[in-house]
Amino acid sequence: MSYKERSIWVSLAITIYIWFNYFSTLYRSAQQEILTTSIMQSALLTVVIMTIVLEIFHHIVIAIIDNKNANYDEDERDKQIALLGTQNAYYILSFTTIAAVLHLLFPFMSQRLESLLNLPNEYVIINIIIFGALVAEIVKFATQVFYYRRGF
Amino acid sequence: MSKKITNNIRRLRFDNDEMTQQMLADEVGVSRQTIVAIEKDKYSPSLEVAFKIAEYFNVPLNVIFQYK
């Protein structure tokens, strides 16, 4: 497994772990009907802090384990694989944009979501965008891992 | 049947004092995994990398890569 592929696997795991925590916090709070904007803001702050800390830790650990390739620079194949990942993520983000706009224009379409979250409308939109961005990120990493595994 | 790009880099490496994939990768400026992918015909390199490989082995491009 190349340095780059190993790094992508770890980033994928970190992303899933952090955002699973975020959405499970939101879901639990919503179930207990204690979800407020301050809980959401603190969950978001936790995400930001954990992302920074875990990503720094991840790069340090990988560089120690594979110190020979720590300064590895992407080659043309890495760049093409990254591009394919970004392309797939773009489709998801485009869909998310449409979903957010539809939510704004036709709020009745997502009434159930609003009643579940019990948050002001703008916070529901924020969560739609965050969820879309998360799925896009996972798709990006998964696409890259797929092409590294299958060969490209 | 569709045509595809094949190559004989593996044989050229063998003929060149059993050069390793890592050595070739370092010479042409790509990762060892990229050389592996090229040798298995899973990845077609850019013209620049193809020319670098040909230049390194000192053979014309069509001796290394075939489209068939």
Image (cartoon, rainbow, N blue to C red):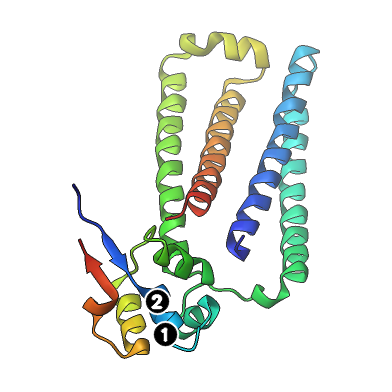
The amino acid type of the residue labelled 1 equals Asp
Give the labeled residue for mark 1. Answer: B15
Q: Is residue B62 left or right of residue B49?
A: left
Task: Name the residue at 57% across, 41% down.
Answer: A138
Chain at tag 2: B
Judge whether residue B8 can be spotted in this image.
Answer: yes
Q: Is residue B62 left or right of residue A42?
A: left
Instruction: Name the residue nearer the viewer: A79 or B51.
Output: B51
The amino acid type of the residue labelled 2 equals Arg
Task: Name the residue at 58% across, 31% down.
Answer: A131
> The C terminus of chain A is located in which quarter?
bottom left
Give the labeled residue for mark 2. Answer: B11
Task: Name the residue at 55% across, 35% down.
Answer: A135
Chain at tag 1: B
Q: Is residue A10 above or below residue A92?
A: below
> The N terminus of chain A is located in which quarter?
bottom right
Circles 1 and 2, Cβ within 8 Å, touching? The answer is yes
Q: Secondary structure at mark 1?
A: helix
